[in-house]
Image: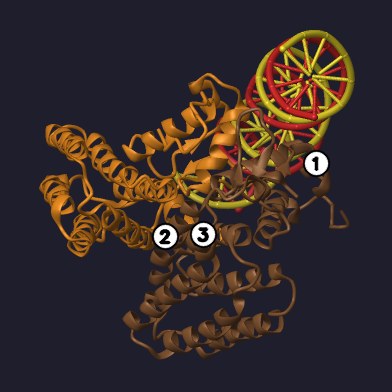
Chain colours: A orange, B brown, C yellow, D red
Amino acid sequence: MSAASKTGKTENDRLSMICQGIRRAILEGALMPGDRLPEDALGESFGVSRTIARHALGQLAAEGLVELRRNRIATVSAPTPADARDIFDIRVALERQVVQHLAGNLTDSQVAELEAIVDAEHDARHGPDGASIRLATEFHIRLAEMTRKPILTRYVTEICYRAGLSLSSLGRPHSSECAISEHLALIDTIRRGPPEAASQMMADHLEAVASRALLSGEGRQTRDLSAILSPYIGG
Amino acid sequence: MSAASKTGKTENDRLSMICQGIRRAILEGALMPGDRLPEDALGESFGVSRTIARHALGQLAAEGLVELRRNRIATVSAPTPADARDIFDIRVALERQVVQHLAGNLTDSQVAELEAIVDAEHDARHGPDGASIRLATEFHIRLAEMTRKPILTRYVTEICYRAGLSLSSLGRPHSSECAISEHLALIDTIRRGPPEAASQMMADHLEAVASRALLSGEGRQTRDLSAILSPYIGG
DNA sequence: GATGGAGTAATTGGATGCAGAACGAGCAGG
DNA sequence: CCTGCTCGTTCTGCATCCAATTACTCCATC
């Protein structure tokens, strides 16, 4: 799925499979912060041995999605509100780059593809929360991929997943209603607009998403103490 | 090898040690793109088994510093000029965030610390290239750390290492001469300046670094094979 | 009923072993 | 002299195994 740069890839890596599976589960809220991810349970779920599961956890920890402490069961990361703020700031910076590179350069088929995603978002707006978040994230990731800049794409993808985790853990149940029309407007502005306008609109959009989801502040009271204390333990 | 190898607490970080060691070796140009990193050799060098070395390679691959292809010996990544351009764009975006958060908020001791690094850069300006790149990178990383935003810091650190790799492989021998005065000016502007000014100065600085180091590389397109392939040979 | 502690089960950290793929030397042929 | 093929060596992919540490349960105690 990631960009194929030069030499053909298509490695049937089981490791990527596991990573992607867990990423999606986290993104959709199926896995919540603090949930435990024991190595052999994981391996058994995915039909591989602990070795692979272990490796996958290492990767996901590097991406900030899971927390790994010595001799302890891996858990889904629990971003603090400060983390979420940090993540969204970075996301704004990166996605501004995306739309600046894209502004005025979208092909018709690309526009169509993006609009198809928004359509799917529209269809899913009354479904489970996870689907909305996943589709909204997909929209942004596809946008990044269209720049054909693999490194930028990688970072945008990563930060989008982290943002998704923040939303599903700290955010209110739902706020995608407005995001849909904003996505449509975004497509249009990117398609024709000057880079600055598109960049600004993306920044406003992401800021709005963050505000709607996170500004509520109280969030939901955490399910257990460890989530509250986790940021203070590791150092 | 002579490290404290007793059981107990501080033995936690063998993996981080390897990662950091390789990162620095790459940053300083001791390891060049295409250099092979066999798991056995790595493990032996660091006095651990393949398992750890393997894990470390996985991490570094996730950071984009090494390339990992199935059943093939890991190699130091070989960024293309396009990759380098991409990396520097991202770096500009991220470091603008850094200075925007920092502008007007630097303490005296922080200023002193940064100036100390620049002093070290000055001392090292006629030494080996690696030292200059390492110190310049350290300057930017410390700057990021001062925001006390761990996630932003992580990304800046990562992108700085990648930029360093690009410089040491694609860049000209020396370009640190001007960077030193620019770093000093940067400190001053961040210390007192408005966020916009500091942000712009950082962008200009990084753009200048990229231009000085990379713009020369554009000229040689398919000139002769040995010149093109020399970075891929590993000598 | 709540608290603290010991013993057992569960889980991770890491090493090793084995199968298979890639690398490279050496040889045959143009 | 250069190109293509074959085969032994090297290296990775992965599973399994053992030691060390943690998590959990149960019981004694306050």
Residue B24 horizontal/vertical position (percent): 68, 60
At 72% from the left and 36% from the top, the residue drawn is B51
In the rendered view, tell whether residue A66 sits above or below residue A20. Answer: below
Label 2 SS? helix
Q: State the separation of the CA atoms marked 1 and 2.
A: 34 Å
Residue A216 seen in the current view: no
Q: Left of B216 or right of it: where is A201? A: left
The amino acid sitting under disc 2 is Ile
Direction from residue A149 to residue A59 in the image, left or right: right
Same subunit, tags 3 and 1: yes
Element marked by disc 3: helix
To which chain does the residue with label 2 belong? B
Which residue in the structure is indicated by mark 1?
A: B41
Q: Are marks 3 and 2 in contact (CB under 8 Å)?
A: no
Type of amino acid at the residue the image marks with label 1 = Ala
Q: x, y (%) of residue B36?
A: 72, 42
The chain letter under disc 3 is: B
Q: Residue at x 69, y 35 (%)?
A: B73
Q: Earlier in the sequence, mark 3 or mark 1?
A: 1
Residues flagged by tags 3 and 2 on a common chain: yes
Please determine whether, in this image, residue B227 is positioned above or below residue B216.
Answer: above
Residue B90: mark: 2
Mark 3 or mark 2, earlier in chain: 2
Q: Nearer the viewer, mark 3 or mark 1?
A: 3
Is circle 1 on the same chain as circle 2? yes
| Disc assigned to residue B219 | 3
Tell me the CA gap for discs 3 and 2: 24 Å
